[in-house]
Image: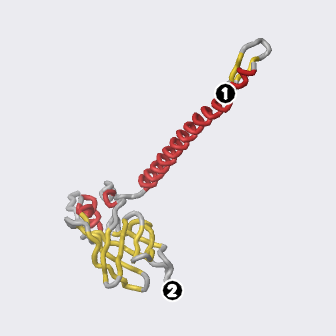
Amino acid sequence: EAGAEAEGGDEDASGIRWVDNTEAARNHERAEAIAARDALSEAEDKVREINAEIGRLETADKKDYGPEDEFFKLADQCFKAEVAQYVYEVCPFASAKQDHTSLGTFEGWQEGYRKMEFKHGQHCWNGPSRSMTITLKCGAEEALSNVNEPSTCTYTADLTTPAACGDAAAAVDVAAQPTAPPPPHDRQC
């Protein structure tokens, strides 16, 4: 019996010898539990990533990218222009800024789909909140240009893009033009 105890085992009342493996079992359970917690944490991270992507896509789906979604390709892009000592950056459907100063977030369209309106930018000292209006122009290359501040803290610029050359953009241009009244009908009664 002394030999059995020296080897870490005991005999129970029926004479069966057993070895205390509680610590080994605990370590094994701990390793399995750690692996399970790691797998759970990884799965939860993936679920959060997928839910974030679903939210981003649902938000993107609610935005107005034009009558035929022709301006969708401008989403998730940003365009820069350097004017004097400032760098202007416009991210269509998101934000506009002058260096690190917010000129506003995208609020919607003006004049059909010819102008993008950015509002509620950083408040001007002794003035209004900054805002920016972007006029879309048809062109082969995408570029931000003609950045101006026509009045205090109100900015304008042109964004040239092939997306503004499509049928829907042309229809908006035609719709914006004044039209002559239709010719009178010669009816014979």
Res. 145 image quadrant? bottom left
Q: Residues within 10 Å of mark 1 (few under 14, many from 20)?
A: few
Q: Residue furthest right?
A: 13
Q: Residue furthest top?
A: 14
Quick check: marks 2 and 1 in contact, CB under 8 Å?
no
Q: How does the figure colour the protein chain or chains? A: secondary structure
Q: Which residue is mark 2?
A: 125
Q: Position of residue 44 (x, y in %)?
A: 54, 44
- Residue at x 70% of width, y 20% of height: 18
The type of residue carrying mark 1 is Asn
- Viewer-nearest residue: 152 or 23: 23
Measure the alpha-carbon separation of dots 2 and 1.
74 Å
Query: Quadrant of the image for the C terminus?
Result: bottom left
The type of residue carrying mark 2 is Trp
Q: Is residue 17 above or below residue 140?
A: above
Query: Quadrant of the image for the N terminus?
Result: top right
- Viewer-nearest residue: 185 or 57: 57
Q: How many marks?
A: 2
Please tell me whether mark 1 sits on a helix, a strand or a loop: loop
Q: Is residue 139 above or below residue 86?
A: above
Foreground mark, 2 or 1? Answer: 1
Mark 2 and mark 1 lie on one chain; the one further toward the N terminus is: 1
Q: Which mark is residue 21?
A: 1
Q: Position of residue 62 (x, y in %)?
A: 44, 54
- Viewer-nearest residue: 179 or 136: 136
Q: Residues within 10 Å of mark 2 (few under 14, many from 20)?
A: few
Q: Is residue 91 above or below residue 87?
A: above
